[in-house]
Amino acid sequence: MNAGIIGIGRYVPEKVITNFDLEKRMDTSDEWIRTRTGIEERRIAADDVNTSHMALAAAEKAIADAKIEPADLDMILVATVTPDRPFPSVACMIQEQLGAKKAAAMDISAACAGFMYGLITAKQFIETNSYKHILVVGVEKLSRITDWEDRNTAVLFGDAAGAAVVGPVSEGKGILSFELGADGTGAKHLYQDEYIIMNGREVFKFAVRQMGESSLNVLRKAGLKKEDVDFLIPHQANIRIMEAARERLELPVEKMSKTVHKYGNTSAASIPLSLVEELEAGKIKDGDVIVMVGFGGGLTWGAIAMRWGR
Ligand code: UT7
């Protein structure tokens, strides 16, 4: 039994904050932000829109896209570091709102690698035939834990949600291989106190190394070569980090997803959000080999090689 993605959905808040808006609030410039990060604008959720609202909106779309009913869900996994409150989990909140009565539900805390952790956890239940339909959501309201006085972090982040329904797919399709990892000794480089605290340079070095290595590892585990890759979906933190991963895989520019300019770094939401956008743009086709790779606070990382399609 192979596990694959059978439905997807996304939600982004309406409110756009451009680099020029930030120039008015802090000592920064559009030029600095664009050249150092690739970010041009980001979406910020309204005060009364919480993480669970965004998760629900993306989840409803993914469930409809999978052509199942909420009652068909066996499990809900929500990857987030910005839950509405410490408990109950966002997963339990949307379980109720969806009416997914038989679904087990929990949140996953793995920062920007959270969606990878969620997909790979879901895969285990599907492939052992324990469960048939698992909703995995990556969602963040990072604006709530961003220090808007700190130009080192405030220019980087945005709010969004992306969701996928994971279920059985035909042989040769779905998740072909994965890698998960963590290094708690690096926790000091990226964490939340009241707000996000980050040593950007240290995270940058770790990310460049890890994104490339994990991508190559999942290819090797799947028995694939660099030239077999049709599309790369890296965590959208910084265009320079993403470019480094693309170069390790020797892929042309058009084979890498880029949404960071529109949404900034949306942490756990960034990979599923990009996946939805690339599918809508027709850049991923049935049978394509895609590599998804993420890294984040913890430190954590995760990568997947998959063959797209049901
Ligand atoms: O999802 C995981 C989350 N985190 C990340 O992915 C972050 C990874 N790191 C990065 O993306 C980059 O390190 C940053 C974008 C955060 C910073 O880029 P950098 O090229 O590493 O810049 P830097 O930290 O070396 O800073 C260069 C200069 C500094 O000034 P001095 O000390 O050289 O005078 C900063 O104070 O840029 C200054 N600076 C800014 N200037 C204008 C830092 N932030 C800003 C800003 N606007 N927003």
Image (cartoon, helix red, strand yellow):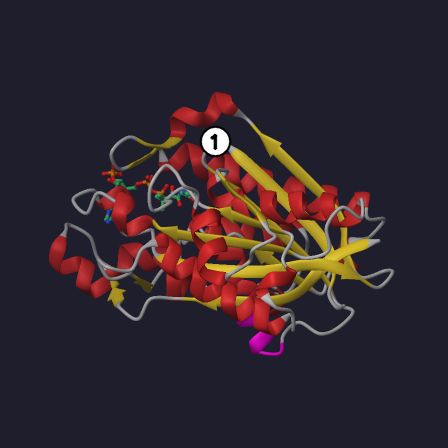
Report the magenta stretch's main SS.
Answer: helix
Please report the residue visible at 48 percent of the width from the left and 49 percent of the height from the top: 91
Amino acid at the residue labelled 1: Gly
Residue labelled with disc 1:
298
**Quarter residue 280 falls in:** bottom right
State the quadrant of the C terminus: bottom right
Front residue of this view, candidates 43 and 57: 57
Dot 1 alpha-carbon crowd within 10 angstroms: few under 14, some 14 to 19, many 20 or more: many
* Vertical comparison of 74 with 301: above or below: below
Where does residue 43 sit, x and y in percent of width and height?
32, 63
Q: Give the range drawn in magenta.
A: 276-282
Please report the residue visible at 66 percent of the width from the left and 40 percent of the height from the top: 213
Where does residue 116 sit, x and y in percent of width and height?
60, 47
Secondary element at image label 1: loop
**Quarter residue 68 falls in:** bottom right
Q: Is residue 34 visible?
A: yes
Where does residue 170 sit, x and y in percent of width and height?
84, 64
Image quarter for ligand 1 equals top left
